[in-house]
Amino acid sequence: MATHRTKMLIIGSGPAGYSAAIYGARAMLEPIMVQGLQPGGQLTITTDVENYPGFADVIQGPWLMEQMRAQAEHVGTQMIWDTIVEVDLKSGPPFRAVGDSGDVYIASTVVIATGASAKWLGVPGEQDLGGKGVSACATCDGFFYRGKKVAVIGGGNTAVEEALYLTNHSDDVTLIHRRDELRAEKILQERLFASDKITRMWNKAVERFVPGDNGALHHLVLKDTQTGEGSTLEVDGAFVAIGHAPATELFDGQLPLEDGGYLKVEPGTPKTEIPGVFACGDVMDHTYRQAVTAAGTGCMAALDAERFLSGIEIDLHGHVEAAEEAEAAE
C-alpha cells in the first residue's frame, strides 16, 4: 500500500478524463489518473467512430482512446491501474480517496470522470445467461455469433448502432422495440431501414430469457405492449441496448444527484457543490452524451481546477475576481 499526493486526482478515464489529464498536465498540475475497471470508457467498446472532429476517415473507438491515453502520458499524467472504492470529499480540500489496491490518494482537486455503464432490463434469465447468449456489448461479443441468429433490444442510438454492427457477423438480426418508432438519430434509422439483414419487431417487450438444454440462451419470451399477446423468438444471442446509467454510486451521500443519477453541477460548468471537486463527461451529461462533448467538459474541469488552485474564479460573464481565500492569504 502506498500514499499518492497530487494537485489533481482524476477518477475514471474516457474522453472526459483523458482531456482533463492533458490540460491538467500542461498546467503543471502533475495529475494522477486512476483509470478504473474500464480504461478508456465506453469508446473502448465502440467500433466505427465517424463524428469525432479531425478525422476524414472512420476511426476505431479503442484506437482513439489509446491515442488520448498516450497523449496524456506524454504531457506528464501519471496513470495508475486501480479502482477507487472510497472517497471523502466533504472533509477537503485536501480530498482523500482509497483504491481497491489499498493505496490512498490525497488530492487538492478531484475531477470525476467515471462515465456510465450499460442498463439492463431486469427480467428473469438476463443475468443468469450473461456470457451464455445475453450481452450488453455487441462489439465485444458479436464475433461469437457469426452466422447465427441474434436480437437487439432497444430503440435508441445504442440499439441501432449495435444492430448495424451485428450485420457484419450475422445475416439474421432482429431489432426488438417496445414502441412503434425509434428514438435513434435519423441517419442511423435510414441505415437500419436500408439493411436487408435486420428485421424489426415493434411494440414488443422482452419478459424473459430462456435457456435451452445446453444451458445457453434458446429463446426470448415477448409480450405485445399494445395487445398483451405473448410470443417467443428463438435466437442464439441477445444484446440489451437500452442505454447507460451514470457511475455515481461512489459519490452517493457526498454529492447531490439529478434525476437519473447524474451528478449535479452548476449550469454551464463542471463545478459540483463542493469547491475543488469537478465532474465531466457522461457522469454529469444527461443531454448530449457524445465523445466530443465529454472531451470538452474534461477540458473545462481541468481549467476550473487550475483556477481553483490559483484562487481565481471566472464568472459566467468572463469577469475575473480574486477569491476571498486568496485575498485573505495575502
Image: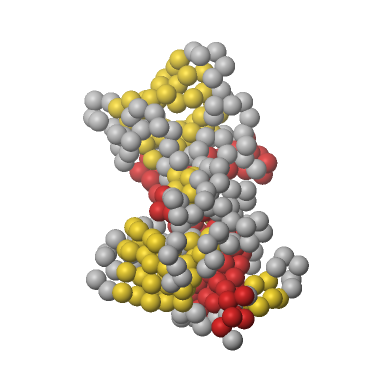
Is there any visible trace of residue 157 in the rendered image?
A: yes
5 or 169: nearer the eye? 5
Q: Quadrant of the C terminus?
A: bottom right
Q: Is residue 232 above or below residue 176?
A: above
Residue at point 35%, 43% (across, down): 144
Is there any visible trace of residue 71 in the rendered image?
A: no
Q: Residue 173 at what x, y percent from top left?
A: 48, 34
Residue at point 65%, 43% (across, down): 185
Q: Is residue 260 above or below residue 12?
A: above
Residue at point 50%, 45% (across, down): 261
- Residue 321: image quadrant is bottom right
Q: Is residue 176 above or below residue 167?
A: above
Q: Residue furthest bottom?
A: 330
Q: Is residue 265 above or below residue 175?
A: below
Q: Residue 141 at what x, y percent from top left?
A: 38, 46
Q: Residue 11 at what x, y percent from top left?
A: 43, 63
